[in-house]
Image: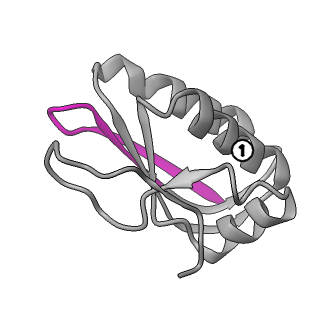
Amino acid sequence: MFGIRVEENGLGATVGMWGEFDVSSLPSLREALDDVFTFGGPAVVDLSGITFLDLQSTRELVVRSLIQAHQLVFQNPSPGVLASIRALGLEDTTRAWSGPQSGTNREEPQVFSEA
């Protein structure tokens, strides 16, 4: 079971994700990430509630983190997300904020890490 919540926040959108993501949830994941652009600003995607992320869903997040880095900000990767990133060998190329960011003065995102 999984859930995705997309909410407009005035400057763009926030996306909350929780539960287990596998091949059956991949269409919903893609649709939600595509929909955030209708809000006209950046989207912050909170990955802290994900308990399992299969490799296809992981690949979807990794690709989007690379090609849509100016529009999507990934935050708080859960241990399940980190494990899947490592399983693909992409921990050095995938970026996510380690915690909530506010304001417009943000530093470069950190590479996924457990620290």
Q: Percent position (x, y) of residue 79?
A: 64, 76
Which residue is drawn at the image coordinates 73% and 50% (left, top)? 58
Which residue is drawn at the image coordinates 59% and 79% (left, top)? 114
- Quadrant of the frame with the N terminus: bottom right
Q: Percent position (x, y) of residue 87?
A: 86, 64
Which residue is drawn at the image coordinates 69% and 35% (left, top)? 63
Residue 21 part of the magenta-drawn span: no
The magenta span reads 1-16
Q: State whether residue 99 is above or below residue 23.
A: below
Residue 6 part of the magenta-drawn span: yes
Give the colour scheme of this rendering: one colour
Q: Residues within 10 Å of mark 1 (few under 14, many from 20)?
A: some
Find numbered disc 1 in the image and state the secondary structure of the residue it sits on.
loop
Q: Quadrant of residue 60?
A: top right
Q: Nearer the viewer, residue 68 or 80?
A: 68
Q: Quadrant of residue 28?
A: top right
Q: Is residue 70 left or right of residue 77?
A: left
Q: Nearer the viewer, residue 68 or 55?
A: 68
Q: Nearer the viewer, residue 58 or 16?
A: 58
* Number of dots carrying numbers: 1
Q: Percent position (x, y) of residue 93?
A: 68, 49
Q: Quadrant of residue 10?
A: top left
Q: State whether residue 33 is above or below residue 20.
A: above
Which residue is drawn at the image coordinates 72% and 44% (left, top)? 25
Q: State whether residue 43 is above or below residue 21.
A: above
Q: State whether residue 7 is above or below residue 34.
A: below
Magenta span: chief secondary structure = strand
Amino acid type, mark 1: Ser
Q: Mark 1 — residue?
A: 25
Q: Is residue 10 left or right of residue 36?
A: left
Q: Is residue 38 left or right of residue 34?
A: left
Q: Residue furthest bottom?
A: 115
